[in-house]
Amino acid sequence: MLEACELNSVSEEDYLELGRAGLGSCLLGGLPDWLVAYSARVVRFINFERTKLPEQILRHNLEEKRKYCIEISLDAERNDAEIQAEGVYNQRLQNLAITLDKVRYVMRCVFGDPKKAPPPIERLSPEEAVSFLWKGEGSLVEELLQSMAPHVEDETLNDLRSKIQVHDPSWSDNILKELQKSLLWLRDEVRNLPCTYKCRHDAAADLIHIYAYTKCFIRVREYKAVTSPPVYISPLDLSPKYSDKFTGLQEYCKTYGENYCLGQLVFWYNQTSVDPDSSLFRASRGCLSLPDIGCFYAKVQKPSRHRVYGPKTVKFMLSWMHSKCLQIEHSVGHLPAGDEGEATPETMAEGPNMDIQRRCGIDEDIVVGVEFSGE
């Protein structure tokens, strides 16, 4: 997809490849060049798969049948594998055609003319990569400094900040190579800082190492979300199993999200996904999802100036008053030693504050004041 978006043109070989697969002007007419180029690359993969798939199917079928069958006809199995591979090939082409038709519809809704649809992804330029990682607003380095600020001394932080400015890769002739060197330098600087359980400089250094060896940074260009015109469904449109679920006409509208077209194109081989942009979000993380660098540093919370009283606070205060009353009764001899003053069922039903009043002679108004005002 990135290759087709960067090229944004269609070669003669692309048209020939698409024509041999049966995808002609009826399906491709009016589509932007980057999308036609992407379709040609998908068709090349489908053709490649068609040549390799029979061997894989044959090997799998033979391994399974040898578990249960003694006699196996190799020619028959090879013929079956060819038939299955041909079925997969045809299904692939059909799914690609359906995908292009869906994407064309959404592009027409968003841009009027599908040819005006810009490429959905683009590679960051070297200058944009430096802004994203090193010195832009919200960059990786800026977030790192903000996260570690509460956990290091001001002198150390200012010294690191000055060194970062010196290692700015923007002035190099080879910006990407210099950016990698600067990130590796920063990795070593951060790793040499002493760690605590609240600031894991070593983990932050590992993350910087991964960023330093990332080869390609891309940006997704989101399209505007659109909602389709309403479609009216009657019970006759459904199978007998669902026809009695409702009566009359039901209005249905589908909303296509900002990344629907990109998700549909990436998952062109799967037409059962109702929400391909959600699948795209999960798949875009790849096998390694880089965490936010701020998660390696504990957030410093300022103590609240307001004292909050709630049910747990009142319960604790009443329990504390109960224990104090027991101590008083022990000291003045009103309660025998060893008697814990267990509440009777009657006092338990009335609540702990009534039990405290009986034992200590506390006026009811005072208890009410404790319970509701916290004083």
Image: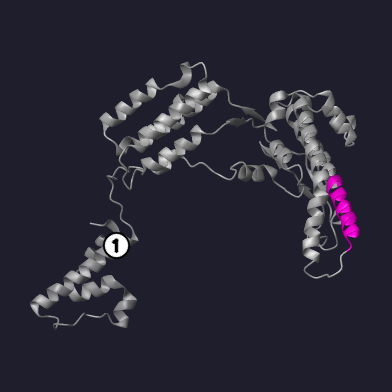
Q: Which residue is mark 1?
A: 314
Image quarter in which the C terminus is found: bottom left
Q: Which residue occupies the foreground of this view, 238 or 272?
A: 272
Could you tell me residue 164's position as x and y percent? 38, 25
Query: Where does residue 254 sit, x and y in percent of width and height?
Result: 73, 43
Side of 78 where 230 appears, left or right = left
User: Nearest the camera: 369 or 340?
Assistant: 340
Q: Which residue does the image show at 67% across and 31% down from the upper left?
A: 2
Locate residue 218 relative to residue 262 in the image: left or right.
left
The N terminus appears in which quarter of the rendering?
top right
* Residue type beneath disc 1: Val
Decide whether residue 79 is among the magenta residues.
yes
Q: Residue furthest left?
A: 332
State whether residue 305 is above or below residue 128. Answer: below
Task: Tell me the residue at 82%/28% (across/down).
Answer: 14
Is 126 above or below relative to 271? above
Residue 26's x, y, as percent? 89, 32
Locate residue 141 relative to residue 257 in the image: left or right: left
* Residue extent of the magenta highlight: 73-90
Residue 338 location, quadrant = bottom left
- Above/below status of 311 relative to 164: below
Question: What secondary structure is the magenta-colored segment mainly?
Answer: helix
Question: Where is 91 relative to 19, above or below?
Answer: below
User: Of residues 12 and 329, which is closer to you in this image?
Assistant: 12
Place of residue 155 in the rendered image (x, y in percent of width and height, measured from the top left): 26, 29
Residue at the image position 81 percent from the left and 24 percent from the top? 11
Based on the picture, tell me whether residue 306 belongs to the magenta stretch: no
The answer, for residue 30, to whether it is visible in the render is no
Local packing at callout 1 (Cα closer than 10 Å; few below 14, some 14-19, many 20+) is some
Of 369 and 96, nearer the camera is 96
Q: Quadrant of residue 46?
A: top right
